[in-house]
Amino acid sequence: MSSRWSRVVGATVMVLTLLGCASSVPGEARPTDTYPLGREDGYIEDSLSPFDDAHPAIANLEPGLRAAAQAAATDAAAQGVDMVVTSGWRSQRYQEVLLAEAIDTYGSETEALRWVSTAEESRHVSGDAVDFGPTDANSWLSQHGHRYGLCQTYANEMWHYELTVEPGQMCPAPVSDAASR
């Protein structure tokens, strides 16, 4: 009988452990439950050239932002700096997935909103924001982005740029985070 009892206890512990690893309540629908994120959502596997106009993440950017990103990438490359896009336009569903993941990561919606906006507020969903990489490209943009009207919007996201000034004007100081907007 003790062997059977040990198996029951062991199975119970295993089930409880697996449930504890779940990122959502069983039966709760998550944005990714219906189908995986894809290109049509603006999902970028790793990174893209700012010139990949066939990809929705680039094609759906506001045209002035896309042109500014491409001009900056051209000039950065001439100075030996490789600039890629790590996120551009996103579907509403993609933004909802990112927010759900951030809530899981940070433990509360309040903290998550410092890093990820709602789909209704996201400048990525409207095509008005682009995230660049790698770090040396972000450093280059922090020095030269204003020449293209590209400004770092959030102090806690050195990769997030928006077209916020006329080319050549100085950028305003970034707000502390997405929740401060």
Image (spheres, grey):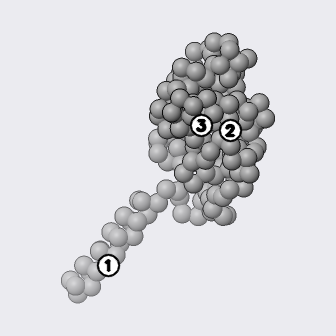
Q: Nearer the viewer, mark 2 or mark 1?
A: 2
Q: Residue furthest right?
A: 63
Let me know if residue 181 appears in the view.
no
In the rendered view, tell whether residue 54 sits above or below residue 110: below
Q: Are marks 1 and 3 in contact (CB under 8 Å)?
A: no
The residues bearing labels 2 and 1 have C-alpha atoms spaced at a distance of 50 Å
Tag shown at residue 124: 2
Give the x, y percent position of residue 64: 77, 30
Q: Nearer the viewer, mark 2 or mark 3?
A: 3
The residues bearing labels 2 and 3 have C-alpha atoms spaced at a distance of 9 Å
- Give the residue at x 59% y 64%: 27
In the rendered view, tell whether residue 76 sits above or below residue 108: above
Identified by mark 3, the residue type is Asp
Q: Earlier in the sequence, mark 2 or mark 1?
A: 1
The local crowd at label 3, few if under 14, some if 14 to 19, many if 20 or more residues have their Cα within 10 Å, is many
The local crowd at label 1, few if under 14, some if 14 to 19, many if 20 or more residues have their Cα within 10 Å, is few
Tell me the residue that label 3 is attached to: 131
9 and 50: which is toward the camera: 50
Tag shown at residue 8: 1
Q: Secondary structure at mark 3?
A: strand
Q: Determine whether, in the image, residue 33 is placed left or right of residue 3.
A: right
Let me know if residue 59 appears in the view.
yes
Tag shown at residue 44: none
Rendered-image quadrant of the N terminus: bottom left
Q: Are marks 2 and 3 in contact (CB under 8 Å)?
A: yes
